[in-house]
Structures are given as structure tokens and as C-alpha cells.
Image: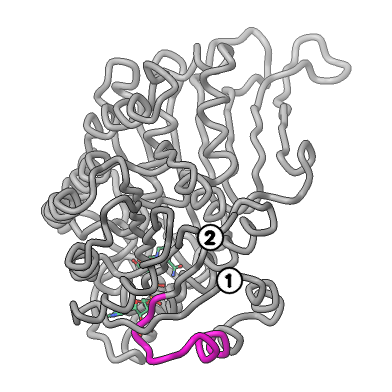
Amino acid sequence: MGAFVIFGATGDLTRRKLLPALVRLQEHKQLVDMKIICVGRRAFVTEQYKEFLKKSMPAVTYESIESLPLQYLSLDFSVPDSFKSLHQALEYADSPSIFYLATNYLLFPEILAGLRAHGLEKTSKIVFEKPFGSDSKSARKLDALIHSVFPEERVYRIDHYSAKETVLDLEVLKFTNPVFEAVLNKKHVARIEVCIDEELGVGERLGYYHGTGALKDMVQSHLLQVLSLVLMRKPKNAGSTALHDEKLRILKKLKVLDPSQHLLGQYDSYQQEAVQAGLPARNTETFARVALECMSAEWKGVPLILQTGKKLPQKRGQIRIYFKQIPSLLKGALANELVIDIYPKQDIYLLVNTRKQGMRDEATPIQFEFSREKAFGPNTPDEYATLLNEVFLGNQMFFPRGDEVLAAWKVIEQVEHMRDKILFMKYPDGVYPAG
Ligand SMILES: NC(=O)c1ccc[n+]([C@@H]2O[C@H](COP(=O)([O-])OP(=O)(O)OC[C@H]3O[C@@H](n4cnc5c(N)ncnc54)[C@H](OP(=O)(O)O)[C@@H]3O)[C@@H](O)[C@H]2O)c1
């Protein structure tokens, strides 16, 4: 029996995402013979941990979790000796373990040291939550440290957007339908926008977010990952390395446009939240709109807009590809658009022109639409369950490689360099900044 070990077992991510994902895998019989060891700093025994979960989770979520084979282990990462108890708990495991680091990246070195000191790294796999460092320097240092303990083939860096259903669709959409592959380039595309807008504020993640902001929290990871999948050419083969090589090629060619093209902002009630939490006033951006250009031969000259923010009027993850307008003899013809909804809807639609009813010389735009829910039912796979299953299977396809993460940090650093020249504005809660 192998073990799935969660570091950070009392944390928000474990309660909201990881444990429910494990339940899902158990329901689908994908958690065969797997012991789950929840590692936390608090001095709980397993029953107390379950009580803690019960109190801090919606009743319905807790009921489903009760069926998981959970064991709690109290361990302080900063005390190397405390990894002995984990060693003992894993001693009789006859298959390799999976270590999931659901903790701040600053704790990764201590955990790696503890695992190595007790010989626990041998054949196991390791999974890291984002953010992976705070800039290219820290990410490079972290990578070097990881590779001194685990080879890259056993390293998984989480970016759950890579497992969102319509993001997974991108490769199929582009590379099995010549009708799309042929037009996704600078000859036909006028502009591409990717957005991840949220209605909620920073909430309980304020402590982390205050020193991080939207650029590092969202643009560096989710938005750049999605953009690289939108822009990449067909990988040389179906393997994971070819896919990562192609994404890396795109990320390395991204150029940040001049400061007048970007916008940073902060929702009005943010400062009050920070003061109440005892944090110093700071211009942490809760909104970022960043304009890029990919200098590759197939995309040069096409503006690429990435946008994300909190306390915005709507919850929306979307990729929108605007095609160039062609001259038309008909009135009413508009440029085509390909829209890929990432969440909450998971629809893909194409805006095309058709003949207006009853008219011979007038066009009108209509939507060709594909709805995942209508086609396959409402039971959307959960992205954390999808990713955990890929870790079990040993497939690294949907996990950003270290060099991709590094290239994404370099894009953010280009923006950080010009931060002082970028317009920064406060915006009312629930309203898009007006810049
Ligand atoms: N929450 C989300 O929605 C979300 C989304 C995407 C990514 N992430 C990433 O996931 C990671 C975890 O996030 P989170 O929100 O779950 O954080 P969190 O709620 O602050 O949890 C952190 C966990 O680490 C444990 N911990 C801290 N120091 C420790 C030590 N010295 N020894 C043992 N345990 C220690 C904490 O234990 P105690 O309870 O004892 O403090 C807690 O279980 C972060 O990297 C975050 O950026 C989170």
C-alpha cells in the first residue's frame, strides 16, 4: 500500500480542495490501496483532527470525508527530528509515497531537508503548490534545491488552471481541427484576451496576498500558463517533454509592452481590511491588466491582454480571440470571435456572420456554440481530482516544468521594473477600474 502525505493538513487548501478531491477519486475507485497521512503542526491525534475538520467544513463535505482512510500526524517542519514519526508511519508502505506540499513555498526547504534526512525521498513523488517562489531568483534557488533531492521526473508543480475542462480542450480544439489551427496566427488574429475576474475579495488569504498582489498570485501562474497553451504550436510529439518545450518557447518570447498599456488597481475596501488585520497600508494590486506581445514568427504584432482582479462585477474566466475584420460587400458583417469560457460556464463559441432573415444584402452575427454541460452533463470533473490522478499515473503533462515557471517569473519582472510608471487606481468594490 502506498501513502499520500499532505503537508499543511490543517490549512485552507487541504480542507477546501485536497480532501474533497480525494473523496472524488475514492468514489471513482482511483484511490486504490492508498493510505492518507495528514501532516500538521497542531498536536492533534487522528480523532481530534477529524473533529477539527468537522467544525471547519460544511457538514455535507465532512460527511463525505469521513469515509477516507485518514491518519493525522503532528510534525513541525522546523524540527528535523520530528520527521522520524513520518518515517515510522511510512516504514511498512510497500509502494512509493506521494508528498503534497500544501504550504507556503518558504517552508519547502525545511520539508525537503526533513524528507532527505530520513531517506524518504528515495522513490517517492513530490507535489508543490503555487506560488513557486516570489521571483526568478527564488524560483531558481528552489529548483536547484529540489533537484538535489528529487529528479525532475518525480516533481509536480500544481497550476490547477491547467486542468480546467476548457483549458484541457485547447490542445484538442487547435490540433485536431484544421479549421482552427489554420487561423490561429498573426495573419488572422487581431487580439487575444485572457481574464480571470473574481467577485470575492481577498478574504482569509489577506496575510499572504498583502505582500504578493495580483501580478504574482494570478498572472505569473494561471494567466501565463493559459496564454502559453493558447499560443503554442503543435508539439513535436504526444509526450510531456515536447509539450513543455513548446510552452517554454512561447513564454520565453513574451515581451511586456510599454507602461501606458497596463493598469493596476486596488478595490476601495482593501485598505480597511488590511488595517483591521493589523497590516501596514500598501499599494498591493488587487487588479492587474497587462499587455504583452509574443515575438515568435507566428504571433509577432498581436496584442495579448491578461486581466485579473478581485471584487469585480462578475466571476468570469475567459479566453477571447478576436479575428481581423475583412472587407465585406454586405452590411452588418462583424469580425469573428472565438470565445472559450473557463468558469463558471464551460462553453466554447464562435461568433460568425450569417444572412439576416429576409435580407439578401445584410449580414448578422450569430453564435456557433458548444456547451460542455449540454453535451456531457452537469457533472464537471474537479481540477484537483484530475491533477491528483495524473500524479498517481505519473503523467507530468499538466504540471508546469521548472523552466516554464522561471520564464513566467521573468515576464512578471519586466512588469515590476516599470511598476512606477504604470497607472494605479482605486476602484469601487464590484466595479471594473475605469482605466
Ligand atoms: N487556499 C487556497 O485557496 C489556495 C489556492 C491556491 C494555492 N494555494 C497555495 O497552497 C498553499 C497552502 O495554502 P493554504 O491557504 O492552505 O495555507 P494555510 O491555510 O495558511 O495553511 C498552511 C498550513 O501549513 C502549516 N504549517 C505552517 N508552518 C508549519 C510548520 N512549521 N510545521 C508544520 N506545519 C506548518 C499550517 O499549520 P498550522 O495550522 O499549525 O498553522 C497549515 O496547515 C500556499 O502555498 C498557497 O499559496 C492556496
Q: Residue at x 26, y 53 (%)?
A: 122
Mark found first going from the N terminus, 2 or 1: 2
Instruction: State whether label 2 is within 8 Å of ligand 1.
Output: no
Q: Which residue is mark 1?
A: 69
For mark 2, does the 10 Å Cα neighbourhood hold few (<14), some (14 to 19), or many (20 or more) residues?
A: many
Q: How is the image coloured?
A: one colour
Report the amino acid beneath label 2.
Answer: Met
Callout 1 amino acid: Pro
Q: Determine whether 95 is above or below 405 in the image.
A: below
Q: Note whether 347 is above or below 277 in the view shown.
A: above
**CA gap, disc 2 and disc 1:** 8 Å
Q: Is residue 204 visible?
A: yes
Q: Position of residue 425 (x, y in %)?
A: 32, 65
Q: Is residue 41 magenta?
A: yes
Q: Say the numbered circle drawn on residue 119.
A: none
Crowd around label 1: few <14 · some 14–19 · many ≥20 (10 Å): few
State whether residue 421 appears in this view. Answer: no
Q: Secondary structure at mark 1?
A: loop
Contact (CB < 8 A) between labels 2 and 1?
yes
Q: Is residue 237 left or right of residue 213?
A: right
- Label 1 beta carbon within 8 A of ligand 1: no
Residue that lies at the very extreme toward the right in this rendered image? 358
Instruction: Point out the quarter of the image occupied by ligand 1.
Output: bottom left
Query: Which residue is found at the position 61% from the left and 70% from the top?
Result: 68
The residue range painted magenta reads 39-52
Across and down, in percent, residue 112 comes to: 22, 63
Residue positioned 30% across, 40% down in the render: 153
Picture quarter containing residue 103? bottom left
What residue would you read off at disc 2? 34
Foreground of the two, 398 or 213:
398
The relative height of residue 222 versus residue 255 in the rendered view (above or below) is below
